[in-house]
C-alpha cells in the first residue's frame, strides 16, 4: 500500500464504502436521508451516481423496520449497510440487532449468515445534549454474535469499513462525529485491515494507556507532548470492542506496571472496566499502582457549553491522571498543560476543529 495523499476520516469512510460497493454488486445502502444534500455527513455523497440509485434505499423514520428489512436482505444474499445518523437511533432497533442479527448464525447451527453492517455515529457539541450525543458502545458490545469496532484514525476508517462489508456476519461500525475531521495518510487502493485490535501507536515504558475512538486522538496529543520532555507512554488504540483481544495490552502492563483506560462513553460499566478487570486477572502481580479509568460522569450529557466544559474527558484530564502515577516535575506539568491548551485556544469548546461545518 502506498500512502500518497492525506484525507479525512469521513472521506476515508466514503471511499471505503464506494470501493466495496463497486467491487461487490450485492452491497446495498439503507438510511434515512440516504441521498439528501448532506448524505450522512458526506459519507454517502454521490455513491448512487456511481453504483446506481437502485442500490441506495431511502427508508422511513422507523429504525426497527429499517433494520428488519436489512436483516432480511442479508439473509437473502445481499450485503446491506445501514447508516444511523446517531447511536441513539439504533436503540429503537435493539431487539432486531440483539435477537435477530446477532443470533441467526448461532440458532441456525451455522447454516445462515447475516452479512450486515450497521454504522452508528456518536454526536458531540452544538447543544445536542442528552438524546443525541451519547456513546453507547458497551450496550452493543455486550451481545455475543456481534462484532463491534470503533476506529479513531482515517487509515482504520477505510480499512475497517471494507472489512466490515466483507464480513459474513453483523458488524457494528461506531464512528465518532469529531473523528470525521481527523486527517491522515490513506492509500487510494482497495484494502481491508481486518477486524483486529488493539493497535499500539506509541511505544514506551512509563505507563500503558488504552483509549477508544475519539479519545485515542486526545491521548495521542498527550503522548506527543510528553515525548517532547522525555517521557514515553505506551498508547493503544483499542479499535475493536468485540471480539476483545487483550494479549498485547497485558504484555505491555507487565512491562510498565501501570494502566490507564480512557472511555469515550460512561466510566461506570464502560469498556475500561472490562479491560481493567481482565488485565488484573492476568497480570495482577506486575502492577505497581492501581489501574485508573477515565470516562464520562454518571449523568446525562448536558447541552450548554458551560456544563460541557467539565463533562468530557480531554487532553488535560488525561495528562493529570498520568501525572498521578508517572513522575512529572510540577513546572514541567504546568508547561505541558499550557502547550496543550494553546493548541485549541481559538477553537470553541463544542466543536472539533476550525474546519467544523456543523451543526451536527
Image: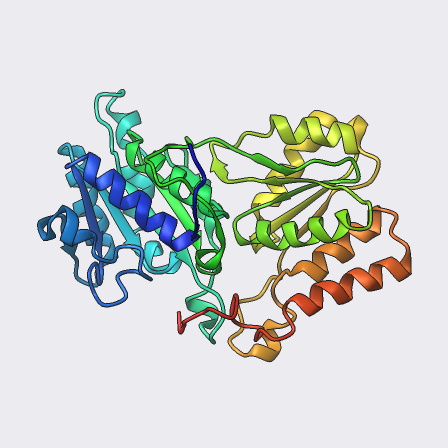
- Relative to 219, 171 lies left or right: left
* Placement of 78 over or under 109, stated as above or below: below
Which residue is located at x 74 percent, y 64 percent? 339
* Residue nearest the viewer, comparing 328 with 299: 328
Q: Quadrant of residue 161?
A: top left
Q: Residue furthest front?
A: 4
Which residue is located at x 51 percent, y 40 percent? 239
* Residue nearest the viewer, comparing 137 with 3: 3
Percent position of residue 355, x then y: 47, 69
**Scheme of colours in the image:** rainbow
* Residue nearest the viewer, comparing 136 with 128: 128
Which residue is located at x 70 percent, y 68 percent? 341
- Relative to 1, 18 lies left or right: left
- Which quadrant holds the N terminus? top left
Percent position of residue 281, x then y: 69, 28
Which residue is located at x 42 percent, y 49 percent? 174
Percent position of residue 13, x then y: 35, 48
Q: Quadrant of residue 320?
A: bottom right
- Relative to 187, 29 lies left or right: left
Percent position of residue 14, x then y: 31, 50
Q: Quadrant of residue 276?
A: top right
Amino acid at each position: 500500500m502506498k500512502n500518497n495523499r492525506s484525507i479525512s476520516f469521513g472521506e476515508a469512510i466514503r471511499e471505503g464504502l464506494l470501493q466495496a460497493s463497486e467491487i461487490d454488486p450485492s452491497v446495498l445502502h439503507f438510511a434515512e436521508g440516504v441521498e439528501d444534500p448532506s448524505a450522512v455527513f458526506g459519507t454517502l455523497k454521490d455513491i448512487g451516481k456511481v453504483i446506481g440509485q437502485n442500490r441506495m434505499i431511502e427508508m422511513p423514520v422507523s429504525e426497527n423496520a429499517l433494520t428488519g428489512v436489512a436483516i432480511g436482505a442479508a439473509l437473502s444474499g445481499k450485503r446491506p449497510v445501514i447508516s444511523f445518523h446517531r447511536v441513539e437511533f439504533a436503540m429503537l432497533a435493539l431487539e432486531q440487532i440483539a435477537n435477530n442479527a446477532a443470533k441467526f448464525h448461532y440458532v441456525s447451527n451455522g447454516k445462515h449468515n447475516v452479512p450486515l453492517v450497521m454504522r452508528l455515529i456518536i454526536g458531540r457539541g452544538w447543544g445536542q445534549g442528552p438524546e443525541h450525543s451519547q456513546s453507547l458502545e458497551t450496550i452493543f458490545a455486550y451481545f455475543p454474535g456481534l462484532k463491534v469496532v470503533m476506529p479513531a484514525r482515517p487509515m482504520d476508517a477505510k480499512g475497517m469499513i471494507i472489512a466490515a462489508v466483507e464480513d459474513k456476519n453483523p458488524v457494528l461500525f461506531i464512528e465518532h462525529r469529531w473523528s470525521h475531521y481527523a486527517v491522515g495518510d490513506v492509500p487510494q487502493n482497495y484494502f481491508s485491515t481486518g477486524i483486529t485490535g488493539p493497535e499500539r501507536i506509541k511505544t514506551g515504558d512509563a505507563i500503558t494507556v488504552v483509549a477508544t475512538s475519539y479519545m485515542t486522538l486526545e491521548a495521542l496529543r498527550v503522548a506527543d507532548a510528553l515525548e517532547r520532555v522525555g517521557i514515553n507512554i505506551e498508547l493503544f488504540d483499542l479499535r475493536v470492542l468485540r471480539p476483545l483481544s487483550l494479549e498485547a495490552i497485558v504484555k505491555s502492563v507487565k512491562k510498565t506496571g501501570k494502566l490507564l483506560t480512557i472511555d469515550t462513553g460512561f466510566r461506570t460499566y464502560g469498556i475500561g472496566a472490562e479491560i481493567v478487570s481482565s488485565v488484573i486477572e492476568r497480570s495482577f502481580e506486575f502492577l505497581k499502582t492501581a489501574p485508573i479509568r477515565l470516562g464520562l460522569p454518571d449523568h446525562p450529557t448536558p447541552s450548554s457549553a458551560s456544563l460541557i466544559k467539565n463533562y468530557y474527558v480531554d487532553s488535560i484530564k488525561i495528562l493529570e491522571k498520568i501525572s498521578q502515577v508517572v513522575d512529572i516535575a510540577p513546572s514541567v506539568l504546568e508547561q505541558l498543560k499550557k502547550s496543550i491548551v494553546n493548541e485549541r485556544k481559538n477553537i470553541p469548546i463544542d466543536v472539533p476543529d476550525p474546519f467544523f461545518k456543523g451543526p451536527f
